[in-house]
Image (spheres, rainbow, N blue to C red):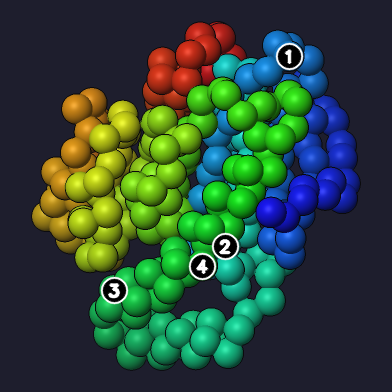
Amino acid sequence: MYSLQFTAESSSNGIVERDFTVGDVPGVLWSPASGADRAPLVLMGHGGGAHKRHPSMPGRAHRLVTGCGFHVAVIDAPGHGDRPRTAHDEQEIAELRRAQAAGEPVGPIVVRYNARLAELAVPEYQATLDALQALPEIGAEGPVGYVGIGLGTGIGVPLVAVEPRITAAVFVSTYPDVLVDKAKQITVPIEFHLQWDDELIPREAGLALFDAFASKEKTLHANAGKHLELPRFEADSAVRFFARHLGQAATSAA
């Protein structure tokens, strides 16, 4: 079991932000500066080509901390952020750039690459969860949620499928090709965000992934717009979703 090491800390506007490592995997933990002795934890997964401090990560984290009093954590995916790229990473990224420049479909490359990253990242998230639950302010008995965006969904679906400690999840649509079988294993409440005019992921494919979730409670949020045009208000919807399912009441800050 890898130990958690905090490497930096800052505090502002009622939020404590701590950089950490679990083994050689870097992450960030946002926590309320004051509040209950223990509070639920929400793990997040960033998009492809992004990192733990991409604006979508602290933005969502701050909403969950100030709106619900939760702890929120994200780690860099393999080959992303502060983690070095392997030769395999460089090869896949070069192939992706070549396809983009040639106007060729990038989906097959992204699907293949994301599937490999998920194989590596799922045990890393489980080790991170082990380490964070050892903290007295989180504890091993509290509920855990997950938010995935793009690659974060590609990692999150197989993670939630095998990790019983995660009791609710929000997924933003990604290439579903290798995720349907994993989605069929998920029974926890799901909120699924899909862009109706997505130029990268066919609408029918996104709907098929939503249909595959075996959850008795699952909600589809379909918004007009392209792949990167997810409305900001959906982040607030996720706060309300987790407030319901992780046992805390959202405040007016949500």
Q: Secondary structure at mark 4?
A: helix
CB contact under 8 Å: marks 1 and 3: no
Q: Are marks 2 and 3 in contact (CB under 8 Å)?
A: no
Counting from the top left corner in percent of width and height, residue 208 is at 14, 51
| Whether residue 196 is visible | no
Of mark 4 and mark 1, the one earlier in the sequence is 1
Name the residue tied to disc 3: 107
Q: Which mark is residue 171?
A: none
User: Label 3's element?
Assistant: helix
At label 2, counting other C-alpha atoms closer than 10 Å, the crowd grade (few under 14, some 14-19, many 20 or more) is many
Please determine whether, in this image, residue 121 is positioned above or below residue 133: below
Q: Which three-letter amino acid code belongs to the residue tagged 2?
A: Ala
- At 82% from the left and 49% from the top, the residue drawn is 5
Would residue 102 be visible to someone looking at this image? Answer: yes
Q: Earlier in the sequence, mark 2 or mark 3?
A: 2
Q: CA distance from mark 2 to mark 3?
A: 19 Å
Circle nearer the viewer, 1 or 2 = 1
What residue is at 34 percent from the left and 76 percent from the top?
112
In the rendered structure, find residue 77 and report the number of the disc placed on it.
2
The mark lying in front, picked from 2 and 3, is 2
Q: Looking at the rendered structure, which numbered label has been put on residue 120?
A: 4
Q: Is residue 118 above or below residue 61?
A: below
Residue at position x 41%, y 83% in the image: 96
